[in-house]
Amino acid sequence: MSADTLLHTPLFTLHEEAGGKMVPFAGYAMPLNYADGIMAEHRHVREHAGLFDVSHMGQVRLRGRSGDGEAAAHALERLVPADIVALKTGRQRYTQFTNEKGGILDDLMVARMGDSLLLVINAACKDADIAHLQDELADCLVEVLEDRALLALQGPEAEDALAALAPAVRDMKFMDVRDVDVDGALCTISRSGYTGEDGFEISLPAMDASRVARKLLEQPAVKLIGLGARDSLRLEAGMCLYGSDIDETTTPVEAALEWSIQKSRRRGGAREGGFPGADVILAQLEEGVSRRRVGLLPEGRAPVRGGAPLYADVEFATPLGKVTSGAFGPTVEAPVAMAYVATDYAAPQTPIVAELRGRAVPATVHVLPFVPARFKR
């Protein structure tokens, strides 16, 4: 897409004023980084608090046509493998839309807000996701929240920064969701994020987004952070990027996301199966898979990027899989990667070999995440 056809978030002017390096991402002009650079931005989030514009993500409200939140929860379980019915008001859960082969159409967050569910879906998938919801859930009202922005405030000083404007957030725990007034804007805030750090995601009216963002940036701990550091942070945290680490060809079990499938949806559970690809996914939960998503620590200083083939030997005779995401990890101070490898080679500390421009690079399978999460539970 040309610069003229890219969509702008409500914070576009703020990014330009701050010197953001704007790049195309999922049809939007988004900041890759600012003047300090990706490495410095990454470290700032780990040490202080970073403000991310994630307004390109999709936000959807789902209601049963009777206005019943319980009906919406039962309906959504026809499309996802998570237990949505047991989700209490004011709580959020991670799950996936699956297809008939058990592959992942998208991953998403689902929050229960009384008589409705709030869904946050990926920018690149949102048109397809919305059509999927509308086609499959005729018994629900699917409201696309076009006039909302989404901010993410992440890092060990995020609570103090947000509490200066909204003291009530101090009482929130990981995956809590509540409506909170922030500088006169009625926001829906979740204590969650995509960095492995404590923090919040703030859904708010688009008309209020720039003002609230600027108020947050008045806090000494807070700096704007771009997509570059967002990617390296989530990679160190072992979190999947849709289209790279998960897609329609990978199942939640292959992707090591089975923790997101609660007992009630598994075999013998109260609402066993009933979602697309359930026969494949439930069988994999019991019988295992031939490949698994793992972390990798390559030797040396050069990152091993997505697409790099993996082998059991330096002769490249026995293929094992491929890297899906890779970068230099500023917190780890070494290259980190995620990959799918044959299950026999998926145990931590297993040595394998990556091919980097025809050269054999030794690597070791590493437990995920590379950097321990610091959520407030």
Image (spheres, rainbow, N blue to C red):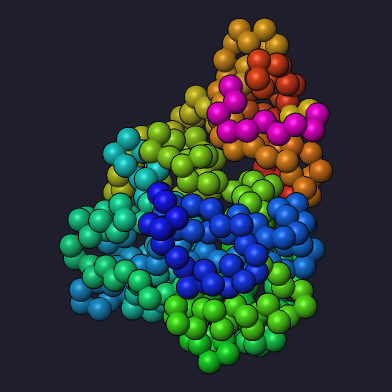
The quadrant of the rendering that contains the C terminus is bottom right
Could you tell me residue 367's position as x and y percent? 69, 38
Question: Principal SS element in the magenta part?
Answer: loop
Up the image or down, 285 lies above or below 58; here it is above
Up the image or down, 20 lies above or below 283; here it is below
Magenta-colored stretch includes residue 196: no
Looking at the image, residue 351 sits to the left or right of residue 324; the answer is right
**Identity of the residue drawn at 43% across and 40% down:** 247
Could you tell me residue 11's position as x and y percent? 53, 72
Q: Quadrant of residue 224?
A: bottom right
The foreground one among 290 and 325 is 325
Count numbered badges in the picture. Answer: 0
Up the image or down, 328 lies above or below 14; here it is above
The single residue placed furthest to the bottom in the displayed view is 184
The foreground one among 9 and 278 is 9
**Identity of the residue drawn at 71% across and 38% down:** 336
Looking at the image, residue 5 sits to the left or right of residue 91; the answer is left
Q: Quadrant of residue 127?
A: bottom left
* Magenta highlight range: 300-309
**Identity of the residue drawn at 25% across and 56% down:** 131
